[in-house]
Amino acid sequence: MIPFWVEVIGVFAGFFGVIAWIPQIKRVWSEKKHDGISLPTFALVSISLILWLLYGIIIGSVAITLANIAALSCIIAIIVGVVKLRN
């Protein structure tokens, strides 16, 4: 079992990691700008997050699981916004 204090560190790390995506989401959805966004890169990031999510579930880490669900949601929002703008 993962010690509580380790999970708290993971929750904070995940929180700041998700906050980092908010300016990109704002740029795509509010400002309607998609220049400089590489969909292949975002697809690879999505695959990485899915694997980290599976890892978090397997080891029973709430912090890793929640952080990767939240980050994956942000990435999907960006991808969907970019695809809408480009079509």
Image (cartoon, rainbow, N blue to C red):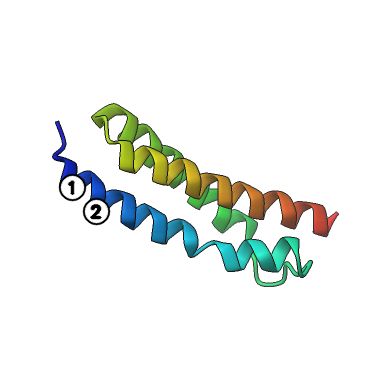
For the C terminus, the image quarter is bottom right
Q: Looking at the image, which residue is at 40% across and 61% down?
A: 16
Task: Report the disc number at residue 16.
Answer: none
For badge 2, the amino acid type reads Ile
Foreground residue among 40 and 33:
33
Where disc 2 sits, the SS reads helix
Residue 67 % position (x, y): 40, 46
For the N terminus, the image quarter is top left
Q: Looking at the image, which residue is at 73% across and 67% down?
A: 34
Residue under pointer 1: 6
For badge 1, the amino acid type reads Val
Q: Residues within 10 Å of mark 1 (few under 14, many from 20)?
A: few
Residue 61: quadrant of the picture: top left
Residue 14 % position (x, y): 37, 53
Residue 26: quadrant of the picture: bottom right
Asked whether, in this view, residue 86 is left or right of residue 9, the answer is: right
Foreground residue among 41 and 57:
57
Farthest residue toward the right?
A: 87
Q: Looking at the image, which residue is at 32% across and 42% down?
A: 63
Instruction: Say above or below: 84 vs 22.
Output: above
Q: Are marks 1 and 2 in contact (CB under 8 Å)?
A: yes
Residue under pointer 2: 9
Q: Looking at the image, which residue is at 49% across and 46% down?
A: 70
Q: Spatial distance from mark 1 to mark 2, Cα to Cα?
A: 5 Å
Q: Residues within 10 Å of mark 2 (few under 14, many from 20)?
A: few
Instruction: Say above or below: 76 vs 21.
Output: above
Residue 45 % position (x, y): 49, 52
Where disc 1 sits, the SS reads helix
Residue 53 % position (x, y): 39, 37
Asked whether, in this view, residue 1 is left or right of residue 60, the answer is: left
